[in-house]
Structures are given as structure tokens and as C-alpha cells.
Image (cartoon, rainbow, N blue to C red):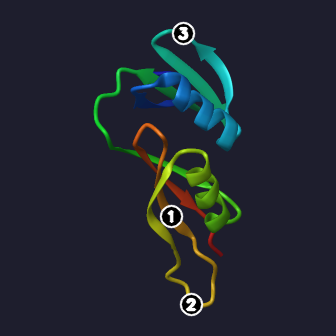
Amino acid sequence: MIVERVKYIIWAKETPRAVAFYRDHFGGRVIRENDHIAELEISGTTLAIHSGGEDDSTWTGLAFQVADVVVAAQEVVAAGGSLSHEPTSDEPGEPPHLAMCADPEGNRIMLTRKRA
């Protein structure tokens, strides 16, 4: 088998809102968009957003590595997302390395910091 591309799919009740969130706040570049699905390229990875989301909250498994988890979490909230777990660290004296958030569609995502 030859794999041509891997993409990660999430669901959205309001696809245009979800596209704007990932485009504007995670630097996504829209590479395909129609009435049913949009695909964005983020750091070399394809994120597909499919219409038809029904649940209020869905764990995605998506994790975004950022330089500063605290600042990134604030940006997610300012962009209409939410914070379900404050940025934390289990390394004494180190800045937080993990925050649990959700996009405006309720898709739960993680923010992480590269650890030494």
C-alpha cells in the first residue's frame, strides 16, 4: 500500500466558523473547501473539517506545540474557544507545558510546549 496523504478530520456544526478559527489562530492555509468539507494545511499536516457535527464536545486527539502555552491558551479563548484545563507543568520551576482547550465547535484540543 502506498499512502498518498494523511489527514485528520474533525466535525463542525458551523464549518465556516471552524475554518476561520484554525485559519486565523493556527495559521492554517485553506487548500480545499466546498459545502461539505474544508481542508487546511497547518505545519505540513492536513486538517479536514467536515460539516454535520452534532455533539457539543468531542475529543479530537489534536495537539498543537507552541512556544508559550499560557499565551496560546489566552489566544484560543479570545478567538471564541474555551479552556477546560488551565496550563500546567509537572516540572518544578518550568513554565506550563500542557493546556486543554476546545475550539468554538466544542472540539477538544491540546496545547503543548516542547519539553527539554
Q: Earlier in the sequence, mark 1 or mark 3?
A: 3
| Badge 2 vs badge 3, beta-carbon distance below 8 Å | no
Badge 2 amino acid: Pro
Which sits in the foreground, 33 or 14? Answer: 14
Q: Where is residue 41 in the image (x, y as percent from the top left)?
A: 65, 30
Q: Where is mark 2, residue-wise?
A: 92
Q: Where is residue 8 in the image (x, y as percent from the top left)?
A: 48, 33
Which quarter of the rendered picture does the N terminus lie within? top left
- Tell me how far mark 1 sits from mark 3, CA to CA: 32 Å
Q: Position of residue 56 (x, y in %)?
A: 31, 39
Helix or strand or loop: what does disc 2 sit on? loop
Q: Which of marks 2 and 3 is nearer the N terminus?
A: 3
Badge 3 amino acid: Asn
Q: Where is residue 48 in the image (x, y as percent from the top left)?
A: 51, 26
Q: Which mark is residue 99?
A: 1
Whether residue 37 can be seen here: yes
Which sits in the foreground, 22 or 32? Answer: 22
Q: Which mark is residue 52?
A: none
Residue at image location 57% in from the left, 62% down from the top: 112
| Whether residue 79 is situated above or below residue 18 in the rendered picture | below
Residue at image location 58% in from the left, 59% down from the top: 73
